[in-house]
Image (cartoon, rainbow, N blue to C red):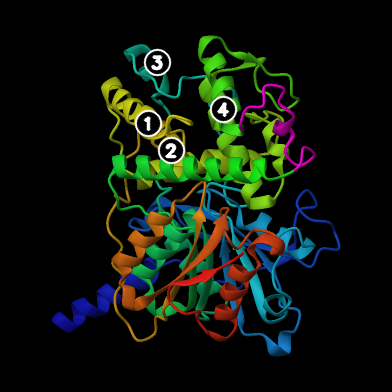
Amino acid sequence: MRVRYEIVALFIASHLLPQTHAIEWKPCPTTLAPEDSPVRCGNISVPLDWDSLEKGNVTIGIAKLPARSQNERIGNIFFQPGGPGQRGSESIINMSTGSLQVGSEILDRFDMIGVDPRGAGLSNPIKCDVDIFNSRLPYYPSDPDSFEEHMTSSNLIDYMDSISIAKDYEQVRIELGDEPMNWLSVSYGTQLGSQYAELFPDNIRSMVFDGVVSQSQSHISMYLAGASGLDATFRDFARWCESQNTATCPALRDSKNRTVIEMFADITAQAEKQPLPCKSAGCLRPNLTADEIRVGAAEAIYNTTTQNDASSFTLLNPPLSANSSAYANSKSFAAVSIACQDWAHHDNMPEDIKLKEVLASSQTPLLKGLSNAYQFQLGCIGWPANIRNPPHPISIPRTEKLPKILITEAIYDPATPYTWGMQLREEIGKDRVVLGTKNGAGHPCYEQPDATGGKTKTAIEQYILDLTLPDDGAIFDS
């Protein structure tokens, strides 16, 4: 009877697993890529709920840039651009045009694969009310009324957690031919990658985590580490700016001869008393509060250190547009949806927010703690869906097939502080990880132009090409 039951169980399991089909590759929509683009787009169907396959399916969009030398091809590189919610398809198209620089040998020998996570881009996109999403709310809602306004009443998302997304990636890997995966991830993609490795450690040829997001720390630790990392990067930017000429750093024209830090502190102090006028075409509102200026400056620092372009300082708080496509807006909606399925919701009362405001004022008075980490915590107040992927230390099974993982971190990272990479290294095991450090600023290292990120990028690409790792603890003077 036992044999009979096992046969029945195998029969049922085989009919519940998602079916594999050859991906049909077509030209990508012309809104994303020109007609003559070498990038091809396709999609697969995966279960909405991997634990209950009968609940139906969702579509996962994929972009592929074929290796230029197919006879020397090594395999696929899955590039995960982070976010959360960033669209892999957009990154692959940027690689094809050169706006995202990738080494020539990598493009010759690997198919570059970009997967749009469920809820974003070419996958079934999340759609939300743009006006509600753009609503003006305080960043530290410490009274009951403003706290209630932050609470969402949407029940759109129940299956946007990173475990579900990691399983989607595995299904894509299988349907691409079941080859071992080369995983190149930045920012949130490192959290997704570490959870993929927990589930499928035998299916990986190489794995890079650049600018690590650590899920396992306490919410207060995450908040303070994120705020401190951004504050340090801002101060490093100010030192750099003051070493330049007035064309590069217009702040040096200040008639009061203030430092960049002093000027920023004066501006936010004025805005604390009364919102300041905002006349840029990118302004969402006619004026900006002090916290909105801090958030805008944080975003500008991110872009400046990553792209060597300070023009973001003229575009504080750009809004989402109701006229934009679902593809364009979905990354913002997916970002909150994923974060609120992965990270615990601790801010249940106005007093919880007040504690963070007090901590921020004492630890990082310049930016008052308004980092990426805090904005995700703030966005999850009252989230209606259960947390499907609770925070936990990463525990990757030991297996002979899993290679050493390369972690790269910048000393001054405005989004993911250096300590998060150190923490993930401890969780995985120091003997299973090689850590490389960029002696400079930016997030992430890989996506920066070669002029500033070259040595770190070269080490990453060399590892993927022939599995040659840098020395553990190597410092890259990029």
Look at mark 4 in the image and give the residue it sits on: 262
Q: What amino acid is labelled 2 in the image?
A: Phe
Q: What amino acid is labelled 3 in the image?
A: Ser
Foreground label between 1 and 3: 1
Q: Residue 9's x, y, as percent?
A: 26, 73
Q: Is residue 132 above or below residue 33?
A: above
Are the residues flagged by discs 1 and 4 in contact, CB closer than 8 Å?
A: no
Compute the Cα span from label 1 to label 4.
18 Å
Crowding near the residue tagged with mark 2, few <14, some 14–19, many ≥20 C-alpha atoms within 10 Å:
some
| Badge number at residue 146 | 3
- Please name the predominant secondary structure of the magenta segment in the image: loop
Are the residues flagged by discs 3 and 2 in contact, CB closer than 8 Å?
A: no
Q: Is residue 389 above or below residue 96?
A: above
Q: Is residue 132 visible?
A: no
Q: What amino acid is labelled 4 in the image?
A: Glu
Look at mark 1 in the image and give the residue it sits on: 360
Q: Which stretch did the figure color magenta?
A: 245-259
Foreground label between 3 and 4: 4
Look at mark 2 in the image and give the residue it sits on: 376
Foreground label between 1 and 4: 4
Q: Is residue 288 above or below residue 449?
A: above
Decide which of tag 2 and tag 4 comes sooner along the chain.
Answer: 4
